Every structure is written in structure tokens, then in C-alpha cells.
Image (cartoon, rainbow, N blue to C red):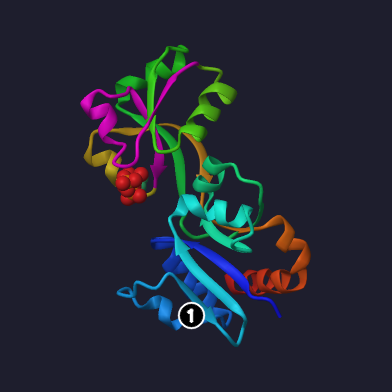
Amino acid sequence: MEYLTFALAKGRLADQTLELFEKIGITMAEMKDKKTRKLIFSNEELKIKMFLSKASDVPTYVEYGAADIGVVGRDTILEEGRHLYEVMDLGFGKCRMCVCGPASAKELLKHQELIRVASKYPNIAKDYFYNKKHQTVEIIKLNGSVELAPIVGLSEVIVDIVETGTTLKENGLEVLEEICPLSARVVVNQVSMKMENERINRLLYDIKNTLK
Ligand code: PRP
């Protein structure tokens, strides 16, 4: 039997994913050790390998078949636009992709004005403004703490993830428009889906029953 390789997005999602896998009998004891510098782990009995990577790299590993299966947020899947199958919504990591800014920016979104939009998600922002709203905007790519942009005058609005809304509130910003809901998803390599169909479907079936 060949190994099935899993790529998990580092951070909050990974912890919840490992918990879920434990419930269906997939244990990766070494992976829970936060101090380990090891990059890849295996369960010899189940013939499973697992590794953590930066969220934005998960779709890349899966598209190229370096991982058969990935668990990553829908935000990353949309932003990366890779060729893979998105097969299941895990229901955790729920949040929303939104256009946010000061209340005063609301008007700018109504009148097709040429505004600046800062985001860690330039492709999602571009798709939303160009294809859905038909508004020409300037997209400015940032790598984190995006809420700073409208505060210091880098942009009029941002496109970012809103979970509890606390970051916005504490910085005098608000949700101006909602783009789409987000949550953790299972993605599968297109060739693996055919070659390992039985094992992957069994796994998805087990996950589905646990999520009920
Ligand atoms: C995310 C997101 C928001 C925040 C939203 O940032 O970009 O900043 O969480 O959460 P809230 O609505 O519950 O306040 P993250 O913590 O991933 O860090 P980053 O700002 O460096 O991207």
C-alpha cells in the first residue's frame, strides 16, 4: 500500500484538524509536540504521512501531488486558484471575507470611485471589485495587520477576514460589504482522487460521520 500524504495549514486549523483525525482513528502523536522541529510525520500502521505548511502553500503541495489531501481555509483556496478538488466543508474555522473600512468609506463603494484596496488577498479583492462590482480599484498587497492600512491612509478600504469583529471594532473600522463565508475545507489532488479513490472516499465518509 502506498502512503497517503496530508498537508495541513499551520496554526488554529491544524489543531482542530488533528483533533478531528484522532476521532476517526488517525493519530499522529509526535505532531502534537509543539517543540519539535521535525517537518513530516508518519503513521506506519495506517500508511499515512502528514506535514504542516504555511496555509498558502497547501494548495500548491496538493496540486502537484506532493500531498494527496490538504486541509486549508477557503480563503486560501480562492486566493491561490489551484487545480484541485474541494471535497468537503469541515465546518470549523468559520469566518467571513469582507470589505472593511471606516463608516465614511461606505459612500466610496456606491459610486464606482477609483479607490485603493489593501489586502493579503489581492486575487479575491480583484475578482470582487472587477468581476462582481465592476468597479476599477487599485489593489495594494499587504502581508498582515491589514487593518492598519485605512488608519494610516494607505488605502480607503481593505479586503480581509472577519471572525469575531474585534480587530475592526478596536480600530474604529466596520464591515462595509460581505464577499463570502469561509471555513476549513478538505482538498484533494486530482490524480490521487482517481488512483486512491477507495481510501480517500472511506476517509471522507468517516469524517462526515464524525461531523454529524
Ligand atoms: C486575521 C484577520 C483579521 C483578524 C480578524 O488576522 O486578518 O486581522 O484575524 O479576527 P477578528 O474578527 O476575530 O478580530 P490574523 O490574526 O490571522 O493575523 P494578520 O493580521 O497578521 O493577518
Q: Residue at x 52, y 79 (%)?
A: 42
Quickly name the residue at label 1. Answer: 28
Residue 60 locus on image (x, y percent):
56, 51
Displayed quadrant of residue 168 = top left
The answer to whether 124 appears left or right of 144 in the picture is right
Asked if the beta carbon under badge 1 is closer than 8 A to the nearest atom of ligand 1, the reply is: no
Q: Quadrant of the C terminus?
A: bottom right
For badge 1, the amino acid type reads Met
Q: Residue at x 48, y 31 (%)?
A: 125
Q: Residue at x 48, y 68 (%)?
A: 51
Residue 196 locus on image (x, y percent):
74, 69
Residue 202 appears anywhere in the view: yes
| Residue nearest the viewer, comparing 115 with 38 | 38
| Residue nearest the viewer, comparing 81 with 212 | 81
Residue 68 locus on image (x, y percent):
63, 64
Against 167, is 49 above or below?
Answer: below
Name, please, the residue furthest toward the bottom. 45
Is 2 magenta? The answer is no
Against 211, is 24 above or below?
Answer: below
Secondary structure under tag 1 reads loop
Displayed quadrant of residue 162 = top left
Q: Quadrant of the N terminus?
A: bottom right
